[in-house]
Image (tube, coloured by chain):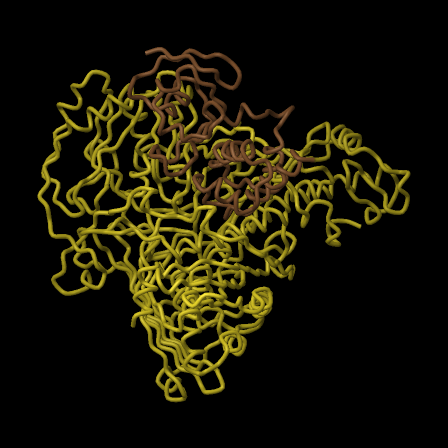
Amino acid sequence: MSFKDKNFRIVGKPMPRHDAWEKVLGNVSYAGDHEIPGMLHVKVLRSEYAAARLIAIDTSAALAVKGVETVLTAEDVPNNETVTKFGQTHTVGGFEGLYRVLAEKKVRFFGEAVAIVAAKSPEICDEALKLIRVEYEPLEGVFDPAEALKPGAYLVGEDDSNLICQYKVRKGDIGAGFAKADVIVENTYRVPQVDHAYLETECGSAWLAEDGVLTIRASTQVIEHFRGIAEVLGLPQNKVRVIAPMVGGGFGGKEDITVETFLALVVFKTSKPCTMTWTREESLLSHGKRHAYTMKYKTGASSDGKLVALEVDILSDAGAYVYLSPWILLYSTVKATGPYNIETVKVDARTVLTNNIFASANRGFGGVQVCFAYERQMDEVAKALGMDPLELRRKNFLHQGDALATGRVLEHAVETEQTAINVRKMLGEKTVSDKANILIGQGIASSMMSYGRMTFLHDTSRSYVSIELDGSVTIRCGVQDIGCGQKSSLASIAAEVLGVELTDVTVYFGDTALTPLAGTTTATRQLYMSGNATLKAAQYIRDNLLNKGAEVLKVAVEDLDLADNKLVVDSDPSLAMPLAELVKICASDGVELFNLAQFNAPAREFMDFTTGQGQVFADFTFGSHGIEVAVDTDTGKAEVLKYVSSYDVGQALNTLSAEGQIEGGAIYGLGYGMTEEILYEKGRALNANLATYLIPTAMDVPDIEVDMIESHGGIGPFGAKGLGEPSSVPSAPAFVNAVCNAIGKSLSELPATPERILRALKN
Amino acid sequence: MNIEIKFNGQTKSLTVKTTQSLLSALREDAKAKEVKDGCSEGDCGACTILMDGKAVNSCLVLAPAADGCEIVTVKGLGDASNPSTLQRGFVTSGAIQCGFCTAGMVVSAKALLDTNPNPSRAEIREGLAGNLCRCTGYQKIIDAVECAAQKNNS
């Protein structure tokens, strides 16, 4: 009996996380906790205009302040403008974006970095920042993507158009599809720009190592930005090292470069160590946000509830720089239909530059916005047909073997229907209101969210596993641990395969110098990618141990297993040998007890953008959320009474941790549904603090009932699927569907604030 | 100016500026890096410490005001050889993800249980409303405090 029979000792059990003790004891040194003797403090001067021409910058008075070491502007940066790159990917066209370290020529958003100061103390930095004279010529700017597309619109960048890119999907004859429809439902959905609001703001330190390697220790989801940083400085890639200690929350907001290039520049210019931590206001003003979208949905259905036509138009506000906007738009384009099989489909999507804060990755990566639209639209179609919303969904869900509108066939497990049935059952009968002003409503929403990067990027991950002479296990893997258990999952896999306890494993992670590169901690890819790489490496060592064990004990390999730090003989327990003893024999005989394995994701050709046909994703995680609300018709306040969530997780690595992802994802998404929105006045964010940008508190949310289906049908280790992003996708539409069910009116805009609910009630 | 505090059971003298926050004094001068800075404005609770037994946002307290006070951080509640029931509860309940809010959250929970040893789930939610967590959705944190309360009372 071995892990191959799914008779797990560790995998699939509720276990304390591997990294829990160090965190609860206060022992973890996060990126902002690191001190180096003599280190300089670094601060940024940020633009107070959303659109302006930069005429001149005078830094002389700032430089004259005692204790100021250096003041840097764009002209001090060896390569101030480069092209964005994300990880060790196959080069594909159409996704390039300008990466500009410090503002040059034109300022594009309020909060953009214009200059940096390095000084002996933060107070001296502040004094110097005030003395930098920047001459701006204010420009009109453009803040609405529809306006930005009009002829003669203000140009955000240096190109002759604000349009970044557009994609389309075509399936069948859309005209014929609508001609067959008995009902046609048309709505426009709007979702705002929102922030990640991780508790740890952007921070890090940097120094020049004795061998001349410029070393940066930063809060990041992507240590492989060392390549981009090297390019900015004009250094060889192997002269820049990036270390990511435990990250205090990422959610996509630390996927782009934040503090790294500023710190690297100061070390490059001064050879002195330095540190930087962004204030909460800076964090809210200057890292990438989730894109605001306007989405027009037109759906045709036959009277029996079959979806025969869907026409979608998506307009995405990319903000001031391109960053990941084209990738995110592609995610939205492919996922615009949701987990539904629709006869004819026409999707058009565009993303456009404006002078708002730039938008980039945020948990769900373009899958979240369209889920709000397609799941609100399903309820509106159900209403038009007089059909139960679950019934309508069940008539149209995609199943294993069906094809997406892009032609991509779903080869792996698709349990969406079961998750939807489960959440409906878990919600139970509607609570009966005993007050005239309290209306009760229930809503469900289902979603399809990919895990793993786009297949034409030819993604890879590497992990090194070794077993030490005392039988303890070491993993070296370049994952960034952003709090979802990236490190803990790898420890679980190695412990399971090598028959040791979780606490017998030590994981070194997140260091471009010392841990094999494992790609980005983004796209819900680390369990899938680095989990598979770790499984492969551990399996190699296991095979070597078992082969030697069979030779020593003169038994068949098939009769052997590794469990409880022992080599176990299934047919004769008395023959068991301590693992450490077997390891010593292997070491003495030269048997390899280490392995560096690489896992390659299935690689595909680039999607055909003229037809929108081709494979973009390797697999998806399917799930559903169900919410019951009580709406106060006097105040518009919607209180969540019940929250249920069901996912096919494939195989949970650690059930406690998987539940934690599902619960946390639900509440992250509920904030998007209820309160979160960056409010703007001509590009200036009005709520750049946590007193006015409201994320859920413990009092705002209920307990969540979690249901996990284990289909073993994922392509991660042991059949696992990814949960990080998928767990958050359907929260907002489930919430708004519940509110609409309660009040009998339609809402098409996020967040569904009390004001918006009251307005809907009055219409 | 000089202040003297009792810090996690030990007397400590610190030289602070009159305008300096206690958070800054603890992190920069006392090197108590377990106290986290999430906003410096009293909105997130990451810097919560016990000051004479009461949970406070250390970013909102001026360092001179702490002169003569007893300050306890998460490290003062327990260590690897002798963790507190709350710390144990956070680990076994799966209440920790990124961990950045954890130090403040555990301290707030300690203050709650000191005044209300047997809180309901609703009372725990209310007691922790000043501490933001973006990862967990709070549920396993509530579980952890409930679990610790039961252990303390048994």
Percent x, y of residue A7? 75, 51
Judged left or right of residue A66, residue A708 is: right
For this rendering, which residue is in front, A729 or A150?
Answer: A729
Q: Looking at the image, which residue is at 32% across and 21% down?
A: B20
The answer to which quarter of the image holds residue B59 is top left
Judged left or right of residue A480, residue A597 is: right
Percent x, y of residue A236? 37, 33
Chain in yellow on the image: A
Percent x, y of residue B101? 47, 37
The C terminus of chain B - image quarter: top right
Q: Is residue A230 visible?
A: no
* In the rendered image, the vertical position of residue A534 relative to residue B32, given as above or below: below
Q: Is residue A749 visible?
A: yes
The answer to which quarter of the image holds residue A635 is bottom left
Q: Looking at the image, which residue is at 37% across and 72% down?
A: A745
Percent x, y of residue A591? 73, 35
The answer to which quarter of the image holds residue B69 is top left
* In the rendered image, the vertical position of residue A221 relative to residue A746, given as above or below: above
Chain in brown on the image: B
* In the rendered image, the vertical position of residue A649 relative to residue A435, given as above or below: above
Judged left or right of residue A271, residue A532 is: right
Mark count: 0
The N terminus of chain B - image quarter: top left
For this rendering, which residue is in front, A44 or A746?
Answer: A746
